[in-house]
Image (cartoon, rainbow, N blue to C red):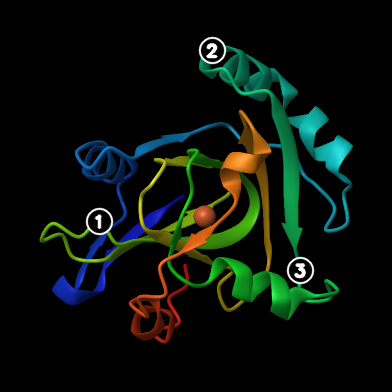
Amino acid sequence: MAILHIPDQEQKLTEPAAIKSFLAERGIWFDQWEAGAELAEDADQDTVLQAYEHVLKPYMNANGYQTADVISVHPKLPNLDMLKTKFLTEHTHSEDEVRFFVDGEGLFWFNLENGEPVFCVICQKGDLISVPANTKHWFDFGPKLSVKAIRVFIDQSGWVPHYTESGVDQSYNALGLSA
Ligand SMILES: [Fe+2]
């Protein structure tokens, strides 16, 4: 179950309906799917995709997504530091970034500007979120360094990160938020 934090206002939302409407008002689509499958830490990509095919396929077909893969992060992953750094600084993409969390947790941070405080959605098993194209955001694997999520793409080249190098992320990452 997701948790939404607004650190500058010391606010926290835990009700799924409240989180969904907070995000919808800001153009960010959020939903929750049944995520009952028990997956081994080292479950391979095909096993994960197959376990959720029944919800994934209709969603992809309805929204024009062409491909899906799985990002699987755990503390023993080779190149973990490099991977963590890649997502941890503020960036945008030219395509929406869609993630369906099937295990562990990950933190999506948003910097919408126009007077909005920076906020974070801690996503956990069953949470589905779509970060709109060109939205400033970053992603933290969190202190447990354990997250498994399905990613869907229209065109993978649209998911290349464009870094803003604003440095906004640093003080928020230092908070070490976790579910
Ligand atoms: Fe991203």
161 in relation to 155, above or below: below
Judge depth for marks 3 and 1 and give the one in front: 1
Upstream in sequence: badge 2 or badge 1: 2
Residue 38 visible in this rendered orientation of the protein: yes
Instruction: Give me the residue at 67% from left, 41% from top.
Output: 150
Q: CA distance from mark 2 to mark 1?
A: 27 Å
* Residue at the disc numbered 1: 112
13 in relation to 53, above or below: below
Give the label on residue 74, or none. 3
103 sits to left or right of 161: right
Q: Nearer the viewer, residue 157 or 168?
A: 157
76 in relation to 133, above or below: below
Q: Residues within 10 Å of mark 3 (few under 14, many from 20)?
A: some
175 sits to left or right of 127: left
Give the label on residue 62, or none. 2
Q: Nearer the viewer, residue 92 or 61?
A: 92
Name the secondary structure under disc 1. Answer: loop
Upstream in sequence: badge 2 or badge 3: 2
Instruction: Give me the residue at 19% from left, 38% from top.
Output: 25
Name the secondary structure under disc 3. Answer: loop
80 sits to left or right of 5: right
Residue 145, image x and y in percent? Answer: 66, 73
